[in-house]
Image (spheres, grey):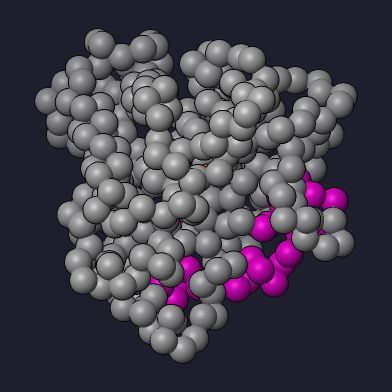
Amino acid sequence: MAFSPTSSGPSACTATAYQLAPTAAGLGFRRELIPALQQSVPEAIGFFEVAPENWAGMGGRAGRDFRAFTERFPFVCHGLSLSLGGPGALDDILLQRTKGFMREHGMTLFTEHLSWCADHSHLYELLPIPMTEEAVRYTAERIIRAQDILGLRIGIENVSTYISPPGAEMTEPEFVRAVVEQADCLLHLDVNNIYVNSQNFGFDPYAYLAQLPLERTCYVHVAGHYVEDDGLLIDTHGSEVIDPVWQLLQAAYQCIGHPVITCLERDFNMPDLVTLSQEVAHIARLQQAALLRPPEQLATPRAKRQATAHTASQGQVA
Ligand SMILES: [Fe+2]
């Protein structure tokens, strides 16, 4: 496991806080995986990701099982329903619950989607936000408020979309950059979402990647998707990661200049834990390769500077 325990705060945190290594590769924590994980957690898995909507306040046997894992392994909190760009009021109660949940289980990283999913009730879809200056200001203000309530900087994830809202005043990567810079938050990079959108809307995923504020990347997702008969790609998290997405992940590490903690998303069509851990191990291999790659081989001048600074701070051989 790629982490080391640190002491918890005096009274604020009832769980042991774990320091995630920058090279940690992880897996979405799902109830159906618990029996296999109780037998043995594969070495490749450096952390788990959970949604507060699914696990906060969980009692009974499932709650006890969950607690047994958060006491032994690092966890990352990934929200599903905050609706940061939505018209409804920001859900302060959910944010307070999330804050308590993270404190209870020693989590220090929270990310959410750059999308909306609720008006007066939940729509159960991650919908794209109109890419306008007004939407940038509106969404950034809500992110700032969420950060104030949670008491930490959060990561905002680029999403897969299937419609293009009318009236766009900027491109999608420009919109992502504008929001995270105005909110002064972090970027949660999902490389499968970039790939899915690039195929459905016909753009170069590498050019898109290069325009994102990668210097703010705190977390990465990689996943599989489904291809419909008409060629439309759907971000299902229900199949293995394909080679073009692995290559995009590798390019992302190169552009960033160093590896970032990365989670394999798998929500449907679940294979056994051994198969899942092989994909997590592949993430770890790409992270190691990015660590060992000399800065002069990296893709952009900015990535070179970042890599040089990172290797110096980590005591790595440049
Ligand atoms: Fe994702």
Q: What residue is shown at x 79% (from left), y 43% (from top)?
A: 138
Question: Between 192 and 20, which is closer to the camera in this rendering?
Answer: 192
Q: Depth check: 54 or 309 in front?
A: 54
User: Considering depth in this image, is 269 or 26 the residue closer to the camera?
Assistant: 269
Asked which quadrant contains residue 316, the reply is top left
In the displayed orientation, state which residue is furthest to the left.
Answer: 317
Which residue is at a point 83% across and 63% down the rendered structure image?
A: 121
Residue sitting at 87 percent across and 24 percent down? 167
Bounds of the magenta segment:
81-109
Q: Give the position of the C terminus as an image quadrant.
A: top left
Give x and y (percent) for residue 203. 61, 14
Above or below, comparing residue 270 to residue 17 in the picture: above
The residue sitting at 25% across, 11% down in the picture is 297
| 276 sits left or right of 293 in the view | right
- Name the one closer to the observer, 86 or 234: 234
Most extreme residue toward the bottom is 60
List x then y, in percent, for residue 190.
50, 36
Residue 40 relative to residue 221: left or right = left
* Residue 100 lies in the magenta-colored region: yes
Viewed as shown, does residue 196 lie left or right of 217?
A: right
Locate the N terminus and report the quarter of the image it occupies: bottom left
Residue 243 position in % (x across, y down): 37, 25
User: Does the image show residue 141?
Assistant: no
